[in-house]
Amino acid sequence: MPTITTEGVCHVANLARLEFNNEETEQFTEQLARILDYIGKLNELDTDDVPPTSHIHPHQVVIMGSQTEASHVAKPDVVKPSYPREEVLANAPEPEEGYFGVPRVVDRSH
Amino acid sequence: MLYELTAHALHEKLKAREITAVELVESLHARIDAVEPHVKGYLTLTKDLALEQAHAADAGFQKGEDMPPLAGIPIAIKDVICTKGVRTTCASKILETFVPPYDATVMRKLHEQGVVVLGKTNMDEFAMGSSTENSAYQITHNPWNLDTIPGGSSGGSAAVIAADTAICSLGSDTGGSIRQPAALCGVVGMKPTYGRVSRYGLVAFASSLDQIGPFTKDVTDCALLLNAICGSDAMDATSVDVPVPDFTQNLINDVEGMKIGIPKEYFTPALDTEVADRVHTAITVLEQLGATVEEISLPHTEYAIATYYIIAPAEASANLARYDGVRYGYRQENPEDLINMYKKTRSEGFGEEVKRRIMLGTFALSAGYQDAYYKKAQKARTLIKSDFDAAFEQVDVIATPTSPTPAFKIGERTADPLQMYLCDVMTTPASHAGLPGISVPCGLVQNGLPVGLQLLGAPFAEEKVLRVAYTFEQNTDHHLQKPQMRVNGATSS
C-alpha cells in the first residue's frame, strides 16, 4: 500500500481544512505512516470477489414506518415547523441580522 | 445507602413510598460531593434540574399513578448525546459553549419515563479514544484504582456507575466505547444491535458503527434501560423497524441447552494471563449451568483493528467537517478570510487525536487512495461480518474477554496512538458486524482491577445475550463487588 510523506500530510491537511506547524507536520507524518503501515496488513486478504459493506442492514430500510427492500428512505411530504430562528442562532459565534455571519467572501471592488 | 442500589430495587422503594425521588437524588448529590472530586466523571452537573425532575416524579408516585420503571431514577448521560438546554461538549473545545436546541430521541424517551438527569459525563473527545484521556477538559479516574484510566471513550459514564455517583448511565459505542470501559470499571455495559436505538441527537463520529447503550449495576437494570431507549425512529433512517420485545422477559436464570462459542482467535499470547484465566473460569461456570461450550473460529479477527482505523476515521472526517466555526461552537477571532477561519478554528478547536483521525480518514478517502484503503477496508468488513454469520449458524452466543488487559496507568499509552488503538482488539470485530454485545464483570485480577466477560449475539438477538448474562450474574457475585476508593489515605466505599 502507498504510504504518506510530509508533502502528503500538507496536502491532506489542506483538504481537511487543518493547518500544522513544522513540528506537528513531522509528528503527524511519522505517526500516520506507522498507522498506515499497520493497516497494510489488509493486503494479506484476497478481496477481489468480496463485495464492500457500507451498512450492515442494507435490506432493512424504513419507508414511512414499514419494512421494505427499498434502498431509499422517504418521509411523508408534510410541512412541519422548524426550530425558531433565534434558538438556532443562539449557538452561532457571530450571528448578524438573523443570519450566520462569516468573514467577507466577495471582494468589495467587483 | 440509596446511591448504592440498582434502579429496579429503587423502583420498588419508590413505588412502596418508602423513599422519595428527592431523597434519592439528594443521596446521589451527597455522594457526588464526596467522591466526584477524585473520580472526575462529570463534565457538567445539573443539580437544580435533577431536583425539579425528582419533584415531578414524586408528584406522580404520591398520586398513586402507575409510574414507569425509571421514574425518579438518577441517570448520567455521556456528553455526546444532545440534551435540550444543557451544554453538550463532546469533551471538545470546539463545542465548549454548545447548548442543543433539541433533545436526542433517547433523551425524549427517558424523559417520558420521568428520569432524573444528574449531568453529562466525561469522554474521549468526539468519542475517539480508549482511555478518556483525550478529553479536552479533564482526566477521569478509575474508581478501582485512581491512578488508572476508566477505559473509553465512555469512561465517565462507566466510572460514575463504579463510583456510585449515578444509578445508571448512557454511553455510545463505535468500536467498543461502552463495552471496554464497562469491563475496566467492573460494571455492566451493553451495545445494542446497530439500528436498535435511534442515533438522532447522538453527535456523529462513525455513522455506520455508532450506537447508544446503557451502563448499569446489573443485567436487570440493563434490560430496563434497553426497554426505554430501543425502537425505530422517523428521525434516524438507520434505525430499524423491528419489534422491540420486553427485554425483562429474558431475565431467565437458565442456560440449559444454549450453545456458547469460544472463538480461538481471541485467546492469543497478547491476552493478559489473568484476564484469560477469569474469562475461562466464567465460561466454565456457564458450562456447569448447562450450556454447551464449543470452540469456534472467526478467522478474520486479526484484521478488525486495521479495518476499523480506516472506516471509522473516514466517516469521522466527513462528519466532523461541520465544525467550521459558522453555525455553532468555537470560532477563531480575526481570521484573514473564510478559508483561514475554517483552518484556524478547526486547528485550535480540535484536540490531537481528533485531528489525527480526521487526517487518517481524509487521506483514506482522498483521490488515488480511496480504493487502496477505504474500499479495501469495506471489503475486509464483509469478511469479518461473514465470520460471525457463519458462527451464529452454529452457536447462540459468543463469549470472549472484553479487553485484552485490565485498566492501565494514566499516561501509560498516550505517547503511542497505535498501542492505544490495539485496546479495541476484542470489541471492534462485533462493531463491524453491528452485533449486540454486553460486558459483565467476571472477577478481579490480583491487583484488584476488574475483568469483563463479553457476550455477543446475532443481530437483534439481544434476548439471548441478556439471558446468558443474567444467568452468569445470578450464579456469581462479581457484580456485587465494589471498589474501595482510597482517597487522601482514607477509604471510602
Image (tube, coloured by chain):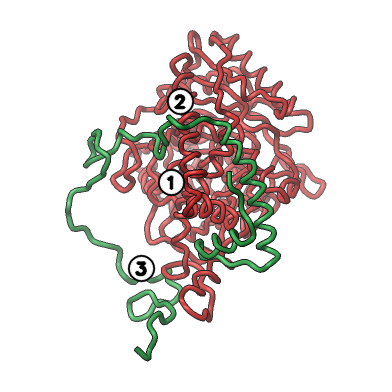
Chain colours: A green, B red
**Residue, x 80% and y 50% (percent of image)?**
B488
In space, the residues marked 1 and 2 are separated at their CA atoms by 21 Å
The answer for which chain carries disc 1 is: B
Q: Cβ–Cβ below 8 Å for labels 3 and 2?
A: no
- Mark 2: which amino acid? Ser
Could you tell me which secondary element the residue under label 1 belongs to?
A: loop
Q: Closer to the observer: label 3 or label 2?
A: 2
The disc placed on residue B386 is 2
Instruction: Tell me if B94 is positioned left or right of B67 in this view.
Output: right
The answer to which quarter of the image holds residue B250 is: top left
Quadrant the N terminus of chain B occupies: top right
- Mark 1: which amino acid? Ser
Q: Mark 2: few, some, or many residues within 10 Å (few <14, many ≥20)?
A: some
In space, the residues marked 3 and 1 are separated at their CA atoms by 26 Å
- Mark 3: which amino acid? Glu
Query: Which residue is under mark 1?
Result: B207
Residue occupying the far bottom of the picture? A109
Q: Nearer the viewer, residue B455 or B323?
A: B323
Query: Which residue is under mark 3?
Result: A87
Q: Cβ–Cβ below 8 Å for labels 1 and 2?
A: no
Residue B13 picture location, percent across and down: 48, 35
